[in-house]
Image (cartoon, coloured by chain):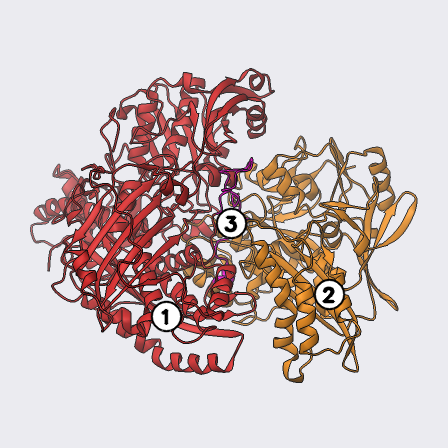
Chain colours: A red, B orange
Amino acid sequence: MSDLSRRPDDAAVGRALAHESAAQHVTGHALYTDDLVHRTPHVLHAHPVCSPHPHARVTRLDTSRALAVEGVVRVLTADDVPGTNDAGVKHDEPLFPEIVMFVGHAVCWVLGETLEAARLGAEAVEVDYEPLPAIVSLTEAIEAESFQGGQPVVARGDVEQGLAGAAHVFSGVTEMAGQEHFYLETHASLALVDEAGQVFVQSSTQHPTETQEIVAHVLGLDSHHVTVQCLRMGGGFGGKEMQPHGFAAVAALGAVLTGRPVRLRLSRTHDMTMTGKRHGFHAQWRAGFDDDGRLTALEATLTSDGGWSLDLSEPVLARALCHVDNAYWIPHVLLHGRVAHTHKTSQTAFRGFGGPQGMLVVEDVLGRCAPLLGIDPVELRRRNFYVEGQATPYGQVVRHPERVAAAWDQVMTTGEVERRRREIAAFNAAHEHTKRALAVTPVKFGISFNFTAFNQAGALVHVYKDGSVLINHGGTEMGQGLHTKMLQVAATSLGVPLGKVRLAPTRTDKVPNTSATAASSSADLNGGAVKNACEQILSRLRQVDAGRGLPWEDLVREAYFSRVQLWAAGFYRTEGIHWDSTVMRGHPFKYFAYGVAAAEVEVDGFTGAYRTRRVDIVHDVGDSLSPLVDLGQVEGGFVQGVGWLTLEDLRWDESSGPGRGRLTTQAASTYKLPSIGELPDELNVALLEHAHEDGVVYGSKAVGEPPVMLAFAVREALREAAAAFGPDGTSVDLASPATPEAVFWAAERARSAGSDHVVEGLPGAVPDRPDPTAPALHPRSEQADRGTAGG
Amino acid sequence: MAEPQITVNGQPRPLAGVPAHTNALDFVRGLGLTGAKEGCAEGECGACAVLVARPDGDGSRWAPVNACLVPALALDGQEVVTAEGLGGPDDLHPVQTGLAEAGGSQCGYCTPGFVCSMAAEYYRPDRTPGPDGFDVHAIGGNLCRCTGYRPIRDAACALGSPSPADPLAGRQDRPAPPPAPTRVDGFARPADLAEALALLAEHPDATVLAGSTDWGVEANLRGRRAAYVVAVDRLPELRDLTTGADGVEIGAALTLSEVEAALGDDVPLLAQVWPQFASRLIRNGATIGGNVATASPIGDLAPALLALDARLVLASAAGDREVALAGFFTGYRETVLRPAELVRAVRVPTPLAAHTTFRKIAKRRFDDISSVAVAVALDVVDGTVARARIGLGGVAATPVRALATEAALEGRPWDLDTVEAASAVLAGEGTPIDDQRASAAYRSAMLGNALKAWWDQAWQGGGSA
């Protein structure tokens, strides 16, 4: 066992604690970025002027009428930018655009004494546009070959040979919608300038360092002139990894130009129309199976809807391609990926980061092919699991594949799956208009940033003379319980009671050059860094103690008087990972997180409405750092995944009418996320036991993203329930999201008994094979060098 | 007239200088009480929920409402409690303790709103503690994006009862504050109906405001500003519910929650509507008159009231007139209401139809807007449909009666053949459109299946609904 993963007896880690801010949350005392406005005098409020066109050239921008509105102080335009007019790291995101690229694109921002004044000022700004042709849907983009960025390929073996040798070959198309983050707290920034010209931005950001860098390059300053702080976020889910930077930069620019604090908070409508979402994907596929239902080959071409700029689309695509296999061994694989360029919001990170979309492809293949193969889907999935010694298509040996099988068997047993499926068969035979189904699906999810450089973290730990401890680390708190875990890690490392440790907000002037709080890795990375800092201090204290076993306070006091340093900067880098994104091979993940879910649903054949009757989950979090936090991540991730797959319905106006390109579900009244009514009647979650992960902080595993994909069980159950309205062996193509309407139409097609849209036999529908000369991913595909065009 | 003020967490807070468009959420946040949050600004997420003392018999009830929808001035003279007023970090309220310990908060942003909704249910006088004593619909209008709700549900179902010394429980024994007559720039709360009608005559461009659950959305999301607001939600003449020989008369300014409580199961069709109508937070604000007068084509109540043959009493300076609801809607968001005329009451005639059903098709089970709503009221005499009334929502520019289907039912034997024949007619009713909620084809299919589903679920095998 490694030093990093060894856990002492009576450790603070492993205790089930409520969120460290729970008492502040429930009393309304927890502060979020926009709450600070009410504690800051003389604040100006920012309001955008948004494009009504999906693609147009700005031919005239006249702000004079806005400036005449009472209370309007200034209008920020491209002419005001002292540095680089760009909000991204790829330099394809002008902050104040000459050509607008989507409906809602901000042309300029109005600053007012009140939000009402800024809003009225924005209405008074005159903008003339010359409309340009716009590509809105993913299929339009594919037809027009409108792509951006690299086109990576993951290949192993010979897919043609694998298909030719298969007993059964099927081909089809799988489409899936994106997802709005709908963090309850919309994007918010509050910028101030101090007496020395230092810029201080409070921002609701998952990536304070990158926010700092973008603010600096917009202002033409070095990074050391800009400090970014994030107290906490009201949810992030990936939506605040890249998207906050431009808003922080606008607030900072306003503060620099006016000398007054500037607040920028997006309304929900603005947030939904202006900021990126989970990528929708389109996938063409061919799959071969042997007589026993074992996958022999899979070819797929995945096209993601990137929106107007690259943002994180390339790494999202890379992760999607690295997860098409999910938990299944596929000998011959050929996967092509490309990012469509469309005139929509710039789609971005969202919990799972492409992994869910990649995995949905293979789950859709299995779900649609099982009836055609005549194999029970539970058995078909189980039969294709990885076993010890097998490697993923990109070359990483799968460690601990037996944990998927163990979780699977546990769910089958504790969920009484066999008995219940028999009861369901009897129920379905007795009910013409109501059908039930129970599906079981696995999750295997790679942990670490594909982009190797991001797998580092820093921490700053202070021990004060009275023995109290203050920790700082580079991760941000968005509800996932990172800070709770870091307090537990510090208390465990130092061997002090939890009450001795306090945590200070995330700030770039405390811990520099941090990675995004993303990729589920923050507890691994920042935990490693906090532990490292604590151990540096401890090793000095041990020398002072010299075996005497002094009480903590006495030891600390003595160390101070002995002129021993009582604080330390900690650092951590993930060892043993490497990745070549140009050829899509390597060992990008420290380990895999595993989980299994069984879901039972009931569908009303008259309406397609459904109810989730029971869900059983076994999930692998290693040795949990904080069981209540981890349970919350598993349950919350699962329900969020169910939202993506069944309910949340992003609709863009794809007509040729005047509303073309507009997001028609841009409000909570039209975009429905799960409410308490969508909670399964019974939800049983167990953490996998005996799951110590060697080489990770206190033997734990990441938990943020993997549970999202447990929701596939609900989607597959809905598919099987819809199919149950038809004759045995009906293959159902279920739209994603599987809204009641989508389930209704699936059941209708099952009743009319045709196997949906799956072509059997070779060559079938051959997926597009992009031009072999298409560019690979950039070797550092999450960042481009400053001042150069990324790619 | 007293200076306008709201009592927030026990402290009087002056409303002087507050513009008519400032909502209660922005007002309390401006006081530094930033626990209540703006999540959606349209009453869908509940992050802004606060408690308001509302009349309930001789006492009062803590009713949670969406503060984002209510103009601050509309709460003149009222008592409001926010999450901060329930307890502080070192002095947690039992609801707060339960939620915190259960892991019911992750990011914490929605949490103060949940706390307020849960506290109202905690203080409901007729609640019995225990798993079945907490009505989860009480938190159906609060959205959480982090937890998946399980720990929140468990915390709610584990709540005990308020102690006898609990001051907020004790507050419910005393009457709610009376409505304060308010007259400031751009906003008026008249004391009685006569004054309201006079004000409307004086201000022909006035916005009539009751629960503000619709107007609040217009103000927040579309920047609409009223030239003048006349608040009618507490007019005494609009707040009676009386049962007479020929029907029930429901005062237009009663909130849907108040109507729900007062009617109980007296009108079974409406009892089916309430749990499916928006959320408790909205039903605590929205009034029955406002819901009808706003003339939404997708409101859930209008189809039910159409099936009940409801009539409206319209009041103006010239006196009352009565119109059938079926003749009230004249076009998209248009009605026969004249300038300076108000809906005073809704009349539901009796005897009620013997058999009724309300079928709402939506994406989400709670807190959603209908794609299609179908309300059916039937009298079956000796196996024959004697009378049929069907109200539809979501399939035309206004709520409509399914007249052709009614004709296809009346006089026919109530059996599967008639159900199928009438279903074919019903599928062709209205002029449904494709939009983000549903396709036209799905809407028509749902019309076509409504009677069949009812038959299957309630009538087949000789059962009766």
Q: Nearer the viewer, residue A275 or A766?
A: A766
Give the residue number, with chain letter if any, for mark 1.
A439
Tell me the quarter of the image containing the N terminus of chain A: bottom left
Q: Is residue A675 magenta?
A: yes
Q: Write the residue at 71% across / 59% down.
A: B303
Give the residue number, with chain letter if any, for mark 2.
B405
Q: Residues within 10 Å of mark 2 (few under 14, many from 20)?
A: many
Give the residue number, with chain letter if any, for mark 3.
A671
> Residue A639: horizontal and vertical position, in percent?
41, 59
What secondary structure is found at the residue carrying circle 3? loop
Chain ID for label 2? B
Query: Is mark 3 in CB contact (under 8 Å) with mark 1?
Result: no
Q: Nearer the viewer, mark 3 or mark 2?
A: 2
Q: Which residues are magenta?
A: A651-678
What secondary structure is found at the residue carrying circle 1? strand
Mark 3 on the same chain as mark 1: yes
Apparent side of residue B235 relative to residue A420 in the rendered image (left or right): right
Q: How far apart are the alpha carbons under marks 3 and 2?
A: 33 Å
> Residue A730: horizontal and vertical position, in percent?
40, 71
Q: Earlier in the sequence, mark 3 or mark 1?
A: 1
Three-letter residue code for mark 1 = Ala
Chain ID for label 3? A
For the stretch drawn in magenta, the main secondary structure is loop
Q: Write the residue at 58% across / 57% down.
A: B441
